[in-house]
Amino acid sequence: MVWHEWGPADGPPLVLLHGGSGSWRHWVRNLDHFAATRRVIAPDSPGLGESDLPPDPEDPPAMARILAHGLGTLLGPTGRYHLAGFSYGGMLAGCLAAQQGARVRSLTIVGSGGLGLPRGVTPLTKVRALTGDERLAAHRANLASLMIADPAKIDALALTVQEWNTRHARLKSPHLSRGTRLADALAGLRCPVGGIWGSRDAPALPDIAAREAAMRAVQPELRFVTIPGAGHWVAFEAAAEFNAALDGFLAAWEAAEGVG
């Protein structure tokens, strides 16, 4: 696996897991903000970005064990950390938190599946055989269908990230986020849990509230924020609002712990 770090080495660790067919670049508009005060750790998950394919790509708990091994190397055998996961990364984060127990200070789920709920239709164009303007147009259409609600926010950076991620993705992850794997993991957690969704998150439409209800059913103390007007890739499209929401979660949980 390939791991990336930003921020002070002695800052409270925040681990960010990216979405399907992605890389650490899904957090490109959030890293500077959190790295100002925290040790931000953002890997390329197994089979995506620059990380190798895992031995068993059909087994998310096995992939979570790979993540746990890497975090043990980076943070030591008892190092604690906050954890956030976007989309497919939220499902992986749930599996990881279930395995890591008290090492996980908090878990924030961002626009994830795995809650046993219907998924909105998001048609995508295959880009593998396309080049030039045709490929760029397909990326723009795919971002509009799945990731970003406001077409005006599909900028050069979004297109660059999408192109890089697409070229490096080998793991086929969409089907792994279906079913109830995340809900099942959440049910056993004792750490604080939060959720952040865009109000126009395409896979969650037309019922964002059902996501909150499903999470709250197994985590009654859930903190949940819906960011108006933002789509699935809420951490990119509404970075300032997302950063403020996650900051609020972390500050509240750290105050409850009595430590920073």
Image (cartoon, grey):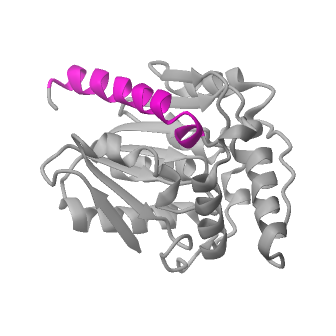
Q: Which of 137 and 164 is in front in this view?
A: 137
Percent x, y of residue 49: 53, 71
Residue 180 lies in quadrant: top right
Residue drawn at (49%, 36%) of the image: 239
Tell me where residue 119 appears, x and y as whole percent.
Answer: 79, 40
Query: In which quadrant of the rendered image does the N terminus lie?
Result: bottom left
- Indicate the quadrant containing the C terminus: top left, top right, bottom left or bottom right: top left
Q: In which quarter of the image is residue 59?
A: bottom right
Locate residue 124, reporting x and y percent: 84, 56
| Residue 166 at x, y percent in the picture | 66, 68
Q: Can the viewer see residue 82? A: no
Residue 145 lies in the magenta stretch:
no
Using the image, determine if residue 118 lies above or below residue 81.
above
Q: From the viewer's perspective, tell me whether residue 154 is left or right of residue 66.
A: right
Question: Foreground residue, 49 or 68?
Answer: 49
* Relative to 117, 44 lies left or right: left
Depicted 50 relative to depicted 69: above or below: below
Residue situated in front as seen by the camera: 121 or 236: 236
Q: Can residue 240 be seen in this view?
A: yes
| Residue drawn at 83 percent across, 47 percent down | 122
Query: In the image, which residues are magenta?
Result: 234-258
Q: Number of labelled discs?
A: 0
Q: Residue at x 47, y 22 (%)?
A: 222
Q: Quadrant of residue 22?
A: bottom right
Q: Is the magenta stretch mostly helix, strand or loop?
A: helix
Q: Residue at x 23, y 51 (%)?
A: 7
User: Which residue is more in the foreground, 190 or 50?
Assistant: 50
